[in-house]
Image (spheres, grey):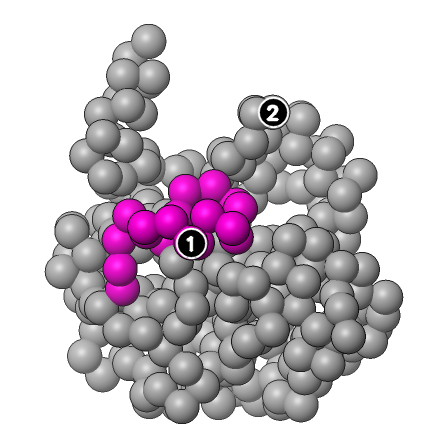
């Protein structure tokens, strides 16, 4: 009863409640990765894993794939620097972006054409969004990280992007497009373990099957990932892939890509 009341009050205030999560892990100098969970906006009570990337830049911290942390998690985050920027890569993500703007005064960036809507139905993008970013991004946009640039999947609906940081052989921060979940982590409940395996989510070095089915990018748009030079992938779902990432993802990117169109 108390948890339900807290959820109603949080949503009424404009923000969803905090999510369970692990520790922030520094994978590279100034680059942290934290895995957490989320309840899917579906009738079946499915809870799955998700992940957030934090990068320290010259003027503070930039967050990709934002997760509302616990107070303990925020204390850990704040010890790394000042939160200044939040970049939305995934068209189906972004539910916690506004929380970071309200808590830290962070500047919010989203890919041009994305909308902040509840749920997972792209058709609802025609309705009024519940918030707007401070800045719309294209592939030509300057990012708050000096060595970073976007590759935008413009044929996806809603649009999606990956962010390439040109360091350590190339670090690719992904939204829903590239995933790596060879097995469910502690943030999955039993309905999600069953259903996500059935839907093809629980695989290593995977192109997001839900993203392909719902957003319908073209084959050529997805396969253009291989035009980028990268050694590592930090996805919004699953574990970080450190080393040989392009080689590991190539079979899936060159594969069937069910849900794509020509």
Percent position (x, y) of residue 51? 49, 54
* Of 122 and 235, the residue lying toward us: 122
Q: Quadrant of the C terminus?
A: bottom right
- Above or below — where is 51 with respect to 243? above
Q: Residue at x 74, y 47 (%)?
A: 202
SS class, disc 2: loop
Q: Is residue 260 magenta?
A: no
Which badge, 2 or 1, comes first in the chain's sequence?
A: 2
The residue indicated by pointer 1 is 126
> Badge 1, how many Cα within 10 Å: few under 14, some, many 20+?
few
Q: Main secondary structure of the magenta part?
A: loop
Percent position (x, y) of residue 138? 41, 82
- Above or below — where is 228 with respect to 185? below
Q: Which residues are magenta?
A: 116-133
- Above or below — where is 258 with respect to 223? above
Can I make out residue 169 in this image? yes
Q: Locate residue 18: give its quadrant.
A: top left
Q: Residue at x 51, y 51 (%)?
A: 123
Quote the CA–CA distance across marks 2 and 1. 26 Å
- Above or below — where is 1 with respect to 181? above
Q: Which tag is nearer the camera, tag 2 or tag 1? A: 1
Left or right side of 194 for 7: left
SS class, disc 1: helix
| Residue at the front extreme of this rendering | 126
The residue indicated by pointer 2 is 44
* Of 194 and 213, the residue lying toward us: 213
Percent position (x, y) of residue 42? 56, 31
């Amino acid at each position: 009863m108390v948890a339900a009341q807290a959820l109603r009050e949080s949503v009424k205030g404009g923000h969803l409640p905090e999510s369970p999560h692990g520790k922030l892990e520094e994978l590279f100098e100034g680059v942290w990765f934290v895995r957490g969970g989320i309840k899917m906006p579906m009738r079946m009570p499915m809870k799955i894993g998700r992940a957030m990337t934090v990068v320290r830049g010259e003027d503070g911290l930039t967050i990709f794939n934002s997760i509302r942390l616990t107070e303990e998690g925020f204390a850990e985050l704040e010890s790394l620097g000042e939160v200044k920027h939040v970049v939305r890569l995934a068209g189906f993500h972004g539910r916690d972006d506004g929380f970071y703007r309200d808590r830290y005064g962070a500047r919010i960036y989203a890919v041009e054409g994305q909308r902040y809507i509840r749920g997972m139905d792209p058709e609802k993008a025609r309705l009024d969004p519940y918030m707007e970013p401070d800045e719309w991004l294209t592939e030509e946009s300057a990012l708050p990280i000096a060595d970073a640039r976007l590759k935008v999947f413009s044929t996806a609906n809603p649009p999606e992007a990956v962010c390439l940081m040109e360091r350590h052989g190339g670090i690719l921060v992904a939204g829903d497009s590239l995933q790596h979940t060879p097995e469910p982590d502690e943030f999955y409940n039993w309905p999600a373990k069953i259903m996500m395996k059935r839907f093809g989510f629980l695989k290593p070095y995977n192109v997001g099957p839900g993203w392909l089915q719902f957003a319908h990018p073209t084959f050529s748009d997805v396969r253009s990932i291989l035009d980028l030079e990268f050694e590592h992938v930090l996805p919004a779902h699953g574990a970080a892939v450190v080393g040989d990432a392009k080689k590991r993802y190539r079979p899936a990117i060159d594969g069937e890509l069910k849900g794509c169109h020509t």
